[in-house]
Amino acid sequence: MAKRKLDAKTVRWMSIVVVFFLIVSLVVTITVGLTNRGKTPQENAGLSVTLTQDGIAKDTLHVEDLNVTPGKQVQVKAKISCQADGNYEFTLTFIETAESPLKDFLDVTVEKGGRTVAQAPLSELLSGGTMSFRQQVFEQESFDLIIIYSMDIDVSDEAQGAEASFDVELSVTNQ
């Protein structure tokens, strides 16, 4: 079979097409990178719970594809508003919604006003454990519960690229 040589015009058009696709790819990559820079899927997620006279409130936060790197953390805010005084019990139940290999490497901390109110490994929580704490709350009081997912800086390479997906059910009852 005889080899066919490409003429100069064909080579030039092929070069232009390749350069065009390279430029388009570069522009798309830069645009996506700048748009998502420093963001995680959970950054804008959160809960908003209002404590009412009947004393029972419940909401669910869906956490999908959580990805935390060693030495870093992801924070999720639960906004709590109270319409009635009470000594409330807050319970967070974690329900695994997909295989979550990252669960073995994450710790969960719940803070209110900069003070830790609960802490546990995510693997324990996804194995049927819950986080509970009591808090005196006054009428018209509003505050944020901060749920922090963190990973120790010394975690092995096993965690690289791993993710976790789960639901966090926050129930609040007035005792």
Image (cartoon, rainbow, N blue to C red):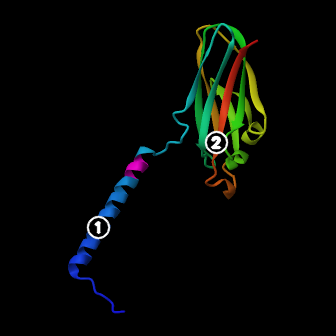
Residue 115 visible (yes or no) = no
Q: Main secondary structure of the magenta part?
A: helix
Dot 2: element:
strand
Q: Is residue 172 above or below residue 127?
A: above
Whole-percent x and y of residue 83? 61, 8
The answer to which image quadrant residue 59 occupies is top right
Examine the structure image and report whether residue 141 is included in the region drawn in magenta: no
What residue sits 63% from the left and 55% below the top? 160
Amino acid bearing label 1: Val
* Residue nearest the observer in this picture, 3 or 50: 3
Extreme residue toward the bottom, this view:
2
Taking 129 as reference, is 68 left or right?
A: left
Amino acid bearing label 2: Ser
* Residue nearest the observer in this picture, 14 or 41: 14
What residue sits 59% from the left and 35% below the top? 75
Q: Which residue is mark 1?
A: 17
Whole-percent x and y of residue 60? 63, 28
Q: Could you tell me which quadrant the N terminus lies in?
A: bottom left
**Alpha-carbon span between mark 1 and mark 2:** 41 Å
Whole-percent x and y of residue 52? 63, 10
Q: Is residue 96 above or below residue 30?
A: above
Whole-percent x and y of residue 113? 62, 23
Examine the structure image and report whether residue 31 is included in the region drawn in magenta: yes
Dot 1: element:
helix
Neighbour tally class for label 1: few under 14, some 14-19, many 20 plus, Cα within 10 Å? few
The range drawn in magenta is: 30-34
Residue contact at pointers 1 and 2, CB within 8 angstroms: no
Residue 80 visible (yes or no) = yes
Q: Is residue 87 above or below residue 120?
A: above
Q: Which mark is residue 165?
A: 2
Q: Could you tell me which quadrant the C terminus lies in?
A: top right
Q: Earlier in the sequence, mark 1 or mark 2?
A: 1
